[in-house]
C-alpha cells in the first residue's frame, strides 16, 4: 500500500512524496504544485531527487534511527539537485514529506519520534513562518513600475483576442505558440482567450488522481487536462473565467528572478482590474488577490530555443461556483495549513465581488489596458 507524505511551505507550494514497493524495490514519487525554473529538464531533476530519496529510505528502517541526522543529511544531498531548479519547493520540504510518508508504514515509536522532531523544527522556524508571504497578504512591489513599462514598450506584443477552443486544443495552442516564439517563428504575442467547455486544468507536476475527484468532474461534463507549466489545479467554467497568455522571448525577463518575472508579466492585469473598480494586488509568488481572497493565479514555463520563450498564463475568476469547486477539487488539509481560511472556495474573491461590470465589459477594459502597455 503506497504511503503519502505532504508538506506545504508557508507562502510556498505543496510537495507530495509517495513511497511504494514495486517488485521488491522501494520507490519514491514526487509531485506537487511547484514550478520548474527551466535551467535544467524538470523531469531529469525530479528523477534525480526520487532516486536519491529511494537510496536513503533503507536507513529509516534501522531500529532507533535518529530522525534529525537523517533529515539533515538528506537535505544536504538534495540541495545541489533542487537548488534553482524547483520554485516553491526545496530540499527541506521534500525530506520532511518523505519522513511523513515513511511514518505511515513504520512502527509507532517512529511516528512518536517524528512528532517530537516536527515540534522542535516548527519552533525553530516560527519566526520565518510569520515573515513568509501568504496568499492573504500583499506581495510588495519587486520591480520598479517604470521598468515594467519600458520592458513592455520594448516587447510590443501582438494582441490576439482568440476564439473559444476546447480544453485539449487550448493546451496544444499553448505548446505550439510558445515553441514558435522560442524559435523565432512567431513575434511576442499576448492572447486573450475563452474555453469551449468546462475543464479542470492541472499543473505539470501534480498527480491528477490526487488533486481531482475524477468521477465528479466527469459527471459535470468537465474535461481534465494538464498544462506544461507548474502550479495548482483550477476549475474552469467558460462564462465564469477570464484567461490570458503571454508568449515572449526570454530577453523580456532577462536579469529578473522568478518572483519579479511574475510581477512583470501581470502588472498590466493589476492595472486593468483596478480600472474596473477591483482592488487587485499581488499575493504570494504567483497570485492576484482582492482585499478578501484570491482572484486568480499565474503559471510560467521557460521554453528553450533561440531566442527562447517565457510562456506566462493567468486565469482569473470572474465568478465562481463554490459547490462545483469543492466537489471536483481534492484540497488536502496540509495544502491549507498556512491559510487563514481553511476552504479553497472561501479563499476565492471573484472579480464580480468588486465591480458591477459584466464579464464582457471587464475583458474589454483589460484589452484596452494591454494595448496601453505596448500591445499593437
Image (spheres, rainbow, N blue to C red):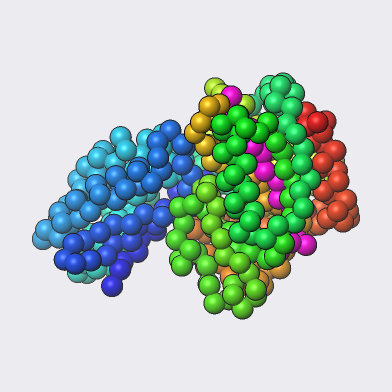
- The vertical placement of 21 against 137, above or below, is below
- The vertical placement of 153 against 47, above or below, is above
**Residue sitting at 59 percent across and 72 percent down?**
217
Q: Is residue 84 visible?
A: yes
Q: What x and y, as percent, mark residue 140?
A: 63, 34
- The vertical placement of 3 against 291, above or below, is below
User: Which span of residues is magenta-colored?
Assistant: 237-251
Instruction: State the residue in front, 251 or 183.
Output: 183
**Residue sitting at 56 percent across and 33 percent down?**
182
**Residue sitting at 77 percent across and 41 percent down?**
160
The answer to whether residue 310 is left or right of residue 246 is: left
The answer to whether residue 185 is left or right of residue 130 is: right
Instruction: State the residue in front, 289 or 25.
Output: 25
374 part of magenta stretch: no
246 part of magenta stretch: yes
Q: Residue 194's image quarter?
A: bottom right
The answer to whether residue 1 is left or right of residue 240 is: left
**Residue sitting at 77 percent across and 37 percent down?**
159
Q: Quadrant of the C terminus?
A: top right
Instruction: State the residue in front, 251 or 324.
Output: 251
The answer to whether residue 296 is left or right of residue 28 is: right
Q: Residue 141's image quarter?
A: top right
Q: What x and y, as percent, mark residue 26?
A: 21, 61
Q: Give the overall secondary structure of the magenta segment.
A: strand
Q: What x and y, as percent, mark residue 73?
A: 22, 42
Amino acid at each position: 500500500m503506497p504511503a503519502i507524505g505532504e508538506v506545504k511551505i508557508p507562502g510556498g507550494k505543496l510537495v507530495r512524496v509517495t513511497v511504494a514497493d514495486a517488485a521488491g524495490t522501494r520507490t519514491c514519487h514526487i509531485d506537487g504544485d511547484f514550478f520548474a525554473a527551466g535551467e535544467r529538464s524538470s523531469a531529469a531533476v525530479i528523477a534525480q531527487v526520487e532516486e536519491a530519496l529511494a537510496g536513503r529510505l533503507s536507513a529509516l528502517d534501522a531500529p532507533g534511527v535518529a530522525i534529525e541526522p537523517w533529515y539533515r543529511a538528506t537535505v544536504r544531498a538534495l540541495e545541489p539537485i533542487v537548488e534553482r531548479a524547483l520554485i516553491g519547493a526545496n530540499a527541506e520540504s521534500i525530506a520532511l514529506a518523505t519522513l511523513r510518508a515513511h511514518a505511515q508504514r513504520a512502527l509507532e515509536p517512529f511516528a512518536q519520534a517524528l512528532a517530537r522532531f516536527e515540534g522542535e523544527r516548527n519552533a525553530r522556524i516560527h519566526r520565518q513562518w510569520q515573515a513568509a508571504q501568504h496568499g492573504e497578504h500583499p506581495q510588495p512591489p519587486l520591480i520598479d513600475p517604470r521598468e515594467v513599462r519600458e520592458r513592455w514598450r520594448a516587447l510590443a506584443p501582438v494582441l490576439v483576442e482568440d476564439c473559444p477552443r476546447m480544453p485539449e486544443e487550448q493546451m496544444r495552442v499553448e505548446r505550439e505558440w510558445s515553441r514558435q516564439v522560442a524559435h523565432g517563428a512567431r513575434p511576442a504575442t499576448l492572447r486573450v482567450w475563452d474555453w469551449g467547455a468546462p475543464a479542470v486544468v492541472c499543473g505539470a507536476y501534480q498527480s491528477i488522481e490526487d488533486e481531482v475527484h475524477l468521477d465528479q468532474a466527469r459527471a459535470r461534463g468537465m474535461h481534465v487536462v494538464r498544462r506544461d507549466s507548474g502550479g495548482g489545479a483550477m476549475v474552469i467554467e467558460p462564462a465564469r473565467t477570464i484567461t490570458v497568455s503571454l508568449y515572449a522571448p526570454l530577453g523580456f525577463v532577462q536579469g529578473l528572478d522568478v518572483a519579479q518575472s511574475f510581477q512583470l508579466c501581470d502588472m498590466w492585469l493589476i492595472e486593468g482590474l483596478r480600472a474596473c473598480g477591483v482592488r487587485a494586488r499581488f499575493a504570494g509568488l504567483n497570485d492576484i488577490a482582492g482585499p478578501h481572497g484570491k482572484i486568480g493565479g499565474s503559471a510560467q514555463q521557460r521554453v528553450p530555443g533561440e531566442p527562447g520563450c517565457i510562456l506566462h498564463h493567468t486565469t482569473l475568476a470572474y465568478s465562481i461556483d463554490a459547490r462545483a469547486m469543492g466537489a471536483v477539487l481534492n484540497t488536502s488539509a496540509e495544502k491549507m495549513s498556512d491559510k487563514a481560511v481553511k476552504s479553497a472556495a472561501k479563499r476565492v474573491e471573484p472579480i464580480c465581488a468588486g465591480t458591477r461590470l459584466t464579464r464582457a465589459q471587464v475583458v474589454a477594459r483589460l484589452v484596452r489596458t494591454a494595448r496601453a502597455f505596448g500591445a499593437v
